[in-house]
Amino acid sequence: MTAGVDWTDHSAADPYTQRFLAAEDQVGFVMDLPAREAPGARYNYNNGLPSLLGPLITRRVGEPVETFADRVLFEPLGIRNYAWATMRDGTPLLAGGLRMPPRDMAKLGQLVLSQGMCKGKRLISRDWVTLSTTHQTRADDYPYGFYWHLSDPSRPWHGDPPSYLGPIDRYRAIMGVGQGGQAIVVLPDVDVVIVVASSNWLPGMTDAFPTRLINGYLVGGIGSGKAGIGNRE
């Protein structure tokens, strides 16, 4: 998210996102974006950038990205009930829209929590988990790893851009965040994974759900036996 290309991305209704979704050649649209500043200079959320990952991974591994993901990740995790959003050419849209039940979302969080291990088998290298969940932006910029949002209670982020979820209280957090209030929140210091699935598209979501739910009802009860919200599937 520090490519330095021209893009604004605050909601699905933003002009750049709409132009990207409407483009016949979506990869070409992203590749042709004009430079605005030097790469690495500043965090700027950009839905176009992860859309390049599908073609890149496909080229690198020699098989479709969806086949590769199922073989090396989803099948070993027991994730079978899922569906990709797709680009115009029918390939997976890696910028978002992957649908699966909350329990399977939790498996992805647990894989991060276990440093890439699942049932005694290593699916992802420990080094990659560590690298991707480490602050990769400038020290004074929005705390972001490789597609993971980060939260540190000793240095809560209240700057610009605002955090999509807002700071998590008490514990360091690694977060996968989706529009509408979808969240996978990993709290490595206390071995906890929290998953939230919602359809909150109202203005002001950043300051409301699911941050208040997590901080008000879940984080405060960890270790005290007072957490009152469990599996509501």
Image (tube, rainbow, N blue to C red):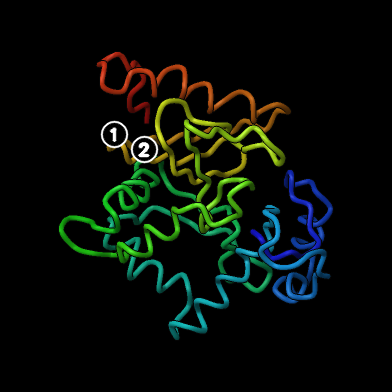
Identify which amino acid the numbered label 1 is placed on: Val
State left or right for residue 143 relative to residue 31: left
Query: Answer yes or no: do the residues labelled 1 and 2 have beta carbons within 8 Å?
Result: yes
Identify which amino acid the numbered label 2 is placed on: Leu
Q: Closer to the camera, 66 or 226?
A: 226
Give how far across and how far down residue 167 sits, in percent.
54, 31
Check disc 1 and report its element: helix, strand or loop: helix
Where does the C terminus fall, quadrant-wise? top left
Instruction: Give the quadrant of residue 20.
Output: bottom right
Give how far across and how far down residue 86 sits, in percent.
60, 63
State left or right for residue 220 relative to residue 50: left
Q: Residue at x 23, y 64 (%)?
A: 122
Residue at the farthest left position: 120
Give how far across and how far down residue 121 sits, in percent.
19, 63
The residue under label 2 is: 187
Check disc 2 and report its element: helix, strand or loop: strand
The residue under label 1 is: 190
